[in-house]
Amino acid sequence: MSDQRGDPIFEAYLTEATQLVDQLEELILACEHDGEFTEEAIHEIFRIMHTIKGSSSMMQYHNIAALAHALEDLFSYLRDNPSRPADWSELSDLMLEGVDFTKVELHKLRNGEPADGEASSVIGKVDWLLETLSRGSGGTDGGAEAGAEGYGGLRQYEARLYFTDDCEMANIRAYQAFFKIKDWLTDFHHVPENLLNDPEADAVIRDHGFRLHMTTDRDYKELYVELSSISYLKELELREIPAEEGADGEREEALLPDGREREPDAEQPEARPASDEPAVRDDGGAPQTGNTARQPNREVRHPAAAHQGTTIHVSVDKLDELMDLVGELVIAEAMVTQNPEIVGLNLEQFQKAARHLQKITKEIQDKVMEIRMVPLATTFQRMNRIVRDMSRKLGKNVTLRLVGEETEVDKNIIEHITDPLMHLVRNAVDHGLETAEERAEAGKPETGVITLEALNNGGEVLILVRDDGRGLNREKILQKAKAAGLLYRPEEDMSDKEIFQLIFLPGFSTKEEITEYSGRGVGMDVVQQNIAEVGGTITVDSRTGEGTVFTIKIPLTLAIIDGMNARVGDALYTIPTTAIRESFKAQAGDIISDPDGNEMIMVRGECYPILRVDRLFRVAGGRPNIPDGVLMMVEQDGRGLCLFVDELVGQQQVVVKALPPYIRKLNRVRGISGCTLLGDGSISLILDIQGLFNLKHEGESEHVGHRGEPDGS
């Protein structure tokens, strides 16, 4: 099948299927934790599998649909035979195997690859379990017998489906509803006729609803349950058509919207008399009998319907475009209010209008940023599966505690920190926590605890990954660092925290044995790198025998930051205000040199290295004497560094832009994270504070910046 990315039907399918699979996995893990699948959970899992089966069949992803069908049959049996015993652990394993298969296939589709995985192995296990359960119950499938009751002669029904106002592509939802029951129908007619290709179909359904006339041997309740399970359904009208009405041809006029005409269809089979319909009970209501000519309108809602009326799905790409436009608006507003041509002029009305423009721009910016924020709950919930699988394979008893999962972060940042969090959790289970025997010997509870916590901290979010395990081995870390030549200063001068930070250096690992999860010397440096890419930092603290805690600091958003602009020669640089501790003028007597000749400055009894920005980036015209300029002390992971600049220009919010492609291709630029356009039209480079610290510690501060470029401005 060709790449369908960009097709709205495909995108709707992929979004819904991904959400359902994530919901399914979370539900299974919760049931496994509780030790049983409750009746409510079984019904919900059945609904999820039924929905995935229908939508996957419609999209012709037959392997996904076949597996969903098999699991649907299994949970149909469990639903109809609640008293039958089952091995819930075996059921959880099997369901999670099905979840993994479906996730892999959806990942292929998301990348434009065919969903060509072989599902027969998992389906075989599902069929075997269903057969085993059936044999255990004497071979009687109560669900099948119950489903067969009431099947008799053909009946005619008319259904009208109305969708919520926020439902996108109502014609696609209508087609999904029709596709759910298509195999039950011996004859049918619906309006609009061409749901997928008629450009007016969506508008017709929004104005008049989706109308479906059908002939089937299914009873009222079965049709009602199937049709009412479709997403974004606002109201469902379903009535059985009496035989005399179905025979006189009036159904055609009833189905067509105002002003539409249609050629009469072939004669329909004789409908079963309405009086023969067995009584069925609507949810919580009185029995509905067939002699009711028209059923009252019923409002049927998806389980999440309470939110559907006020929520819409929007493509992330559209939000990115909107954020870019807001960024341009912020720049345009700054260019107007900071225009050098109006500086010094007494323009009272202009200033009033400018302040109002600034207020509106800020409100729009805040609202768009708020739209992009998503809770960390989904990311945190993924860790349950990792802990569950690893603890089983490693023979450890582990509990995962989630705290503050409602904390919100920019969606783009979440995508960058998911993998680092997974790696940290894996490390906690593999490296950090002891076995049950080791914990018992240490006087600890046999079950180890990993805590994943998120909290807001001003303009940042803190994420803590904490375990109550054995802690980091300080001496072993030092030994490995020495052997690899990774110590950048004498060990006696290094604090415990600085020694622990060595685990983030490339290729560092204290794991002697290579396992499925660790020991390859790749990981923690990549974790730090991924977090640094979104302007974040990671630190580690540990106590022997008590455990380890990793603290991740990330910004709320990447798109717009508060920055302090500084001039160096003819160049402008922007330093994120979250990294600035203070700025000050230095006295000549405060400047000292270390044994290697590097410039240092004493501040309140503490010694800090100085980094000359003009020399780092080879900018001409910078002030040579430190007392003539300004020192900006920036902080990272508890360390301080003083940046020497000529002068401070001012603080403002800036829109972060990526460096132009030709610069990224020609240079390996270090210490620069992006650029921005200031209000006067000039371009400022945004400094990467983590990168500057790395350069300083690597001893490259005097000769590394734009690598491979000649000196000059």
Image (cartoon, grey):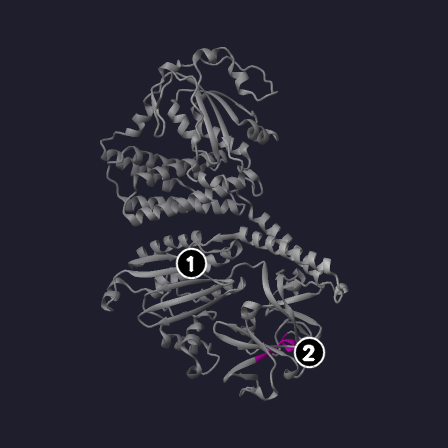
Q: Quadrant of residue 53?
A: top left
Along the viewing direction, whichever of 477 and 573 lies nearer the viewer:
573
Does 611 appear in magenta?
yes
Residue 499, how many percent across, how many down?
42, 76
Q: Identify whether 276 is placed above or below 489.
A: above
Image quarter in which the C terminus is found: bottom right
Residue 420, how many percent across, how many down?
45, 60
Disc 1 designates what residue? 422
- Identified by mark 2, the residue type is Gly
Residue 400, how many percent across, how many down?
34, 57
Q: Badge 1, how many Cα within 10 Å: few under 14, some, many 20+? A: some
Element type at mark 2 = loop
Does 613 appear in magenta?
yes
* Identity of the residue drawn at 61% across and 29% down: 200
> Foreground mark, 2 or 1?
2
Along the viewing direction, whichever of 275 and 508 lies nearer the viewer:
275
Q: Identify whether 409 is placed above or below 279.
A: below
Sequence-wise, the earlier of marks 2 and 1 is: 1
Q: Badge 2, how many Cα within 10 Å: few under 14, some, many 20+? A: many
Left or right of 142? Residue 689 is right
* Identity of the residue drawn at 38% across and 46% down: 25
Q: Quadrant of residue 285?
A: top left
Left or right of 522? Residue 322 is right
Q: How many marks?
A: 2
Disc 2 designates what residue? 622
Highlighted range, magenta: 610-616
Element type at mark 1 = helix
Residue 577: mark = none
State if disc 1 and disc 2 touch (CB < 8 Å): no
